[in-house]
Image: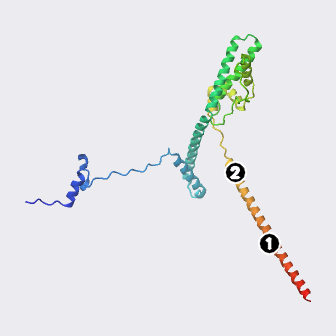
């Protein structure tokens, strides 16, 4: 006896559920395996700086074009949101600048800190053996300078261009057999050299404690807000000057052309008159 022929739907059900895990076969409706869900697009969050910048630009454009149509309560909320976004953008910019400047001046600050610590150590050793009151006073003054130099290399503001407290001297032949007095005189020359303006600020901050030094170290430089407008004004001025020069050149060219045509007409008239009288 011939078996009953299965329908197309039943055949598809067996084929499609054959390779499905037993626990998932019940969820496969009508013998068709469920397709895996499509990956959802990642939702933009507040932590995305690109979104923050775009949102800030959108709010600024809305204030530029439709500020009269914005209700007072909505406008107030948008102003607060814009201020928060601008603060986040500024914080991100400062963080990147800080990291860049730290990496840029890391080595020079390290070497100058080590040099100041070495000179301070040598001065303390000299103080232990010094007996002359004038010499002791001089050594104490030099020790103070060396200690401030050490703090200068550590607490100089991270986000500002570092100015060396020990600028490189002119290249001179090194004397390997230099005496102790020569080394001391060279170190004293470094200590008595002029200091950058920031050195005085760090010296004053040392009197207030470590918190004042750290505040100075992490201070944020003032933004250069007038740089771009000034550049735009210069660009407009240059464009206006170039357009005026072009107009002046065009006017001069037209004047020359008209004078040339008038001269040519005068020459033609003179030639015709001369020919007429010559015929007579």
Residue drawn at (70%, 54%) of the image: 235
Above or below residue 138? Residue 197 is below
Tell me where residue 43 appears, x and y as whole percent: 45, 49
Residue 198 visible in the shown view: yes
**Residue occupied by mark 2:** 231
Residue found farthest to the bottom: 280
Which label's residue is closer to the chain start, 1 or 2?
Answer: 2
Query: As rendered, which of 73 and 251 lies closer to the eye?
Result: 251
Q: Please state if 96 lies on the left or on the right of 269 as rendered.
A: left
Q: Please state if 74 lies on the left or on the right of 3 as rendered.
A: right
Disc 1 versus disc 2: nearer the observer: 1
Q: How many marks?
A: 2
Q: Quadrant of the C terminus?
A: bottom right
Q: CA–CA distance between discs 1 and 2?
A: 39 Å
Label of residue 104 in the image: none
| Within-10-Å neighbours for mark 1: few <14, some 14–19, many 20+ | few
**Residue occupied by mark 1:** 257
Q: Please state if 244 lies on the left or on the right of 161 as rendered.
A: right
Circle 1 sits in a helix, a strand or a loop, which is it?
Answer: helix
Query: As rendered, which of 80 and 273 lies closer to the eye?
Result: 273
Q: Please state if 239 lies on the left or on the right of 23 as rendered.
A: right
Tell me where residue 269 appears, x and y as whole percent: 86, 81
Above or below residue 258? Residue 200 is above
Residue 207 visible in the shown view: no
Tell me where residue 27 appears, x and y as whole percent: 26, 50
Query: As rendered, which of 106 and 51 lies closer to the eye?
Result: 106
Q: Quadrant of the N terminus?
A: bottom left
Tell me where residue 18 appears, x and y as whole percent: 23, 51
Circle 2 sits in a helix, a strand or a loop, which is it?
Answer: helix
Location of residue 218 (image quadrant): top right
């Amino acid at each position: 006896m011939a078996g009953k022929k299965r329908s197309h739907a039943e055949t598809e059900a067996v084929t499609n559920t054959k390779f499905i895990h037993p626990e998932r076969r019940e969820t496969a409706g009508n013998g068709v395996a469920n397709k895996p869900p499509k990956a959802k697009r990642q939702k933009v969050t507040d932590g995305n700086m690109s979104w923050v910048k775009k949102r800030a630009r959108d709010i600024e454009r809305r204030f530029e074009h439709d500020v009269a149509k914005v209700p007072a309560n909505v406008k107030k909320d948008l102003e607060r949101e814009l201020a928060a976004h601008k603060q986040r953008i500024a914080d991100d910019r400062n963080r990147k600048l800080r990291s860049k400047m730290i990496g840029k001046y890391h080595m020079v600050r390290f070497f100058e800190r080590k040099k100041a610590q070495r000179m301070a150590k040598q001065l303390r050793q000299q103080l232990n053996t010094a007996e002359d009151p004038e010499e002791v006073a001089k050594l104490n003054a030099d020790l103070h300078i060396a200690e401030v130099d050490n703090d200068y290399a550590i607490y100089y503001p991270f986000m500002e261009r570092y100015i060396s407290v020990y600028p490189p001297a002119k290249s001179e032949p090194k004397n390997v057999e230099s005496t102790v007095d020569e080394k001391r005189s060279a170190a004293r020359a470094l200590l008595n050299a002029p200091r950058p303006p920031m050195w005085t600020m760090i010296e004053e901050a040392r009197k207030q404690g470590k918190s004042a030094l750290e505040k100075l170290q992490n201070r944020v430089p003032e933004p250069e807000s007038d740089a771009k407008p000034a550049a735009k004004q210069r660009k407009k001025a240059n464009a206006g000057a170039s357009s005026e020069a072009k107009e002046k050149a065009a006017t001069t060219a037209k004047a020359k052309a008209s004078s040339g045509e008038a001269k040519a007409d005068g020459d033609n008239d003179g030639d015709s008159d001369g020919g007429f009288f010559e015929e007579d």
